[in-house]
Image (cartoon, rainbow, N blue to C red):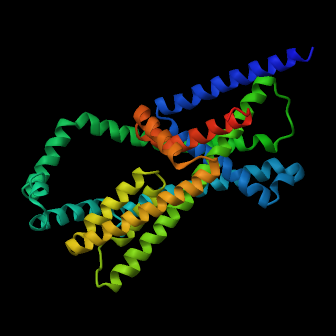
Amino acid sequence: MSSVPDSSLLRHAIAAWLIAGFLLLFALRFHLLPGLLAGLLVYELVHIIAPRLRLAHAGAGKVAAVALLAMLIVAMLMLLFFGAMAFFRSDAGSLPALLQKMAEIIEGSRGNLPDWVVGSLPADADSLKNTIVTWLRGHAGDVELVGREAGRTVVHILIGMVIGAMVSLREARPGEGHGPLAHALVERAARLGEAFRRVVFAQVRIAALNTLFTVIYLVAVLPMLGVHLPLTKTMIAITFVAGLLPVLGNLISNTVIVVVSLSASPSAALGSLVFLVLVHKLEYFLNARIVGAQIRASAWELLLAMLVMEAAFGIPGLVAAPIYYAYLKDELAARRLI
């Protein structure tokens, strides 16, 4: 008699796993990862903040209180998102100005670079401009596609945040009966949300520490040595934003800082490279300790997951790898399979 319910529950659990796996792969395949991450972020923020404000025990007004909190979180995230975009377009943090400055630095440092590096660079600024124009003409369709995809990504993020806010209200409502498959799917969603919270919030702490070290180096150490780099605020902002991406973010921010340091002198660029390598090694250790401790995984496991996911899905796979791996490992551990 007891084997029938157990077998039925197992079938529902397997069906929920298959559905969850399909949806996670679907999000990667059809470029819905930004919306998924935005929704998870809002959902987790609501569930972290609500208990501290005692909204989880607000009685009859609990739904209204949680709804107001969710709307405030969405509004704050949207302000942060558009505020960051405005900063990178402003004079203080202009990305075009940074790219222009980097091009000028490389052009002005040709005499100090090895011959094999100089041979791969354009002869002068006009040649660089002509190269860029030629590339844009030859890839006009790709550039237009990137513009469309950027707009679509912003829409996906906004929709994802709204969906995350709506889903966060589910637990604030009076208990509703769920069938066994629905209950199993809710459990899968809860495990995914927990994996997201552990990985992403740990990565935010790592990015903050990395940014702190960079601020100390750019604002304190270099000026003490008589080196004053331009666009320091932009480089600090890029360090934090790029630091939210595992591995790839370091390459982006490190390249920017080393190239800008070249404007002072080759020795300053070399010093920046040495500093960033040391910080990268420290961050690798912290990543293994912070993220690895959160999901009970070794550094080699995370790197292998990121390698496989990047090969299969590109940059989105690299971003999703720690979250997906943490979710998978949590599911296996819950069934005592690992």
Residue 153 position within the rendered picture, expressed as x and y whole percent measured from the top left? 46, 41
Front residue of 137/272: it is 272
Q: Nearer the viewer, residue 325 or 259?
A: 325
Please give the count of numbered marks on the rendered protein.
0
Is 12 rendered above or below residue 315? above
The answer to which image quadrant residue 192 occupies is top right
Give x and y (percent) for residue 291. Answer: 58, 53
Q: Does residue 74 appear anywhere in the picture?
A: no
Asked if residue 258 lies left or right of residue 199, the reply is left
293, 318: nearer the viewer: 293
Is 97 placed above or below 219 here? above
Q: Quadrant of the C terminus?
A: top right
Residue at x-position 47% and y-position 65%? 210
Q: Position of residue 106 (x, y in %)?
A: 17, 62
Image quarter where the N terminus lies is: top right
Is 213 placed left or right of 99 in the picture?
A: right
Residue at the spot x=72%, y=57% of the render? 49
Among the 4 quarters of the image, the one containing residue 4: top right
Q: Is residue 241 visible?
A: yes
**Left-right relation of 264 to 294:** left
- List x then y, in percent, for residue 230: 29, 73
Instruction: Please identify the residue farthest to the right as the structure is shown.
Output: 1
Q: Residue at x 40, y 66 (%)?
A: 278
